Image (spheres, rainbow, N blue to C red):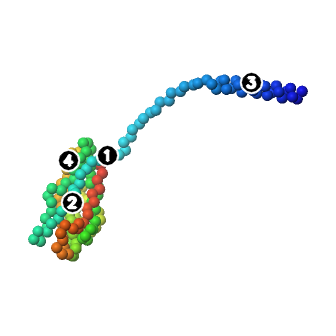
Amino acid sequence: MKHRILSAALALTMALSLFSSASAAEVQRHEVPVTLTVVNTERKISVTVPAALPVSLVDGDVVTATNAAITNQAQTGSIRVTGVSVLPAEYAIGDYTNFSGGRGTIALSLNGCPTRGEGPLALEADGFPAIPAGRSLAIQYDAKVAPEEKPDAVTAATVVFTIAAAE
């Protein structure tokens, strides 16, 4: 008797398992939309900065370029110079306002913002205003130099411009 009940239970289990696989053979199709959202949190900028800021000593007088500029190459949007740093190379960076004239020293003033030593300049807003698309900002610079000897095409210092999109 036990075997009959067990056999009947197994037969019922097999029948139910066939029923489940038959219902699993049904196919359902669901369409799920893909929503695309584009968020531009950064604006691409295109800018040209001077390749060099040449300084020459001609009979003791300092001569600098008159055509240096930062150009906003973008078709839309303004950019702004947010930082300018002057770093030493072959020469030490001096204080432009109180230039001591120590040998091997150079001091710069860029758009009215003088060096106080190496590092960032204190930027004046009117010296570095926003530059609209397709426009340029002239870089008017001057230098004070105390050469060690007769230098010829040495990299006296490095100027680093930091530029960002204007708000």
Marks 2/3 in contact by CB < 8 Å: the verdict is no
Q: Nearer the viewer, mark 1 or mark 3?
A: 3
Disc 3: CA contacts within 10 A as few (<14), some (14-19) or many (>=20): few
Residue corresponding to mark 1: 44
Compare marks 2 and 4 and give the one earlier in the sequence: 2
Q: State the image quarter where residue 28 is shown.
A: top right
Spot occupied by residue 33 in the image (x, y as percentages of width and height):
47, 30
Task: Count up the numbered dots.
Answer: 4
Residue corresponding to mark 3: 15
Q: State the image quarter where residue 153 is shown.
A: bottom left
* Image-based side of 98 in relation to 9, left or right: left
Structural distance between the alpha carbons of marks 1 and 4: 16 Å
Marks 4/3 in contact by CB < 8 Å: the verdict is no
Q: Amino acid at mark 4?
A: Arg
Q: Nearer the viewer, mark 2 or mark 3?
A: 3
Spot occupied by residue 113 in the image (x, y as percentages of width and height):
22, 62
Q: Amino acid at mark 3?
A: Ala
Which mark is drawn over residue 52?
Answer: 2
Structural distance between the alpha carbons of marks 4 and 3: 83 Å
Q: Amino acid at mark 1?
A: Lys
Camera-side residue of 140 and 113: 140
Structural distance between the alpha carbons of marks 2 and 4: 20 Å
Q: Nearer the viewer, mark 4 or mark 3?
A: 3
**Residue sitting at x 28%, y 60%:** 160
Compare marks 4 and 3 and give the one earlier in the sequence: 3
Compare marks 2 and 1 and give the one earlier in the sequence: 1
Q: Mark 4 falls on what kind of element?
A: loop
Residue corresponding to mark 4: 135
Q: State the image quarter where residue 69 is shown.
A: bottom left
Q: Amino acid at mark 2?
A: Ala
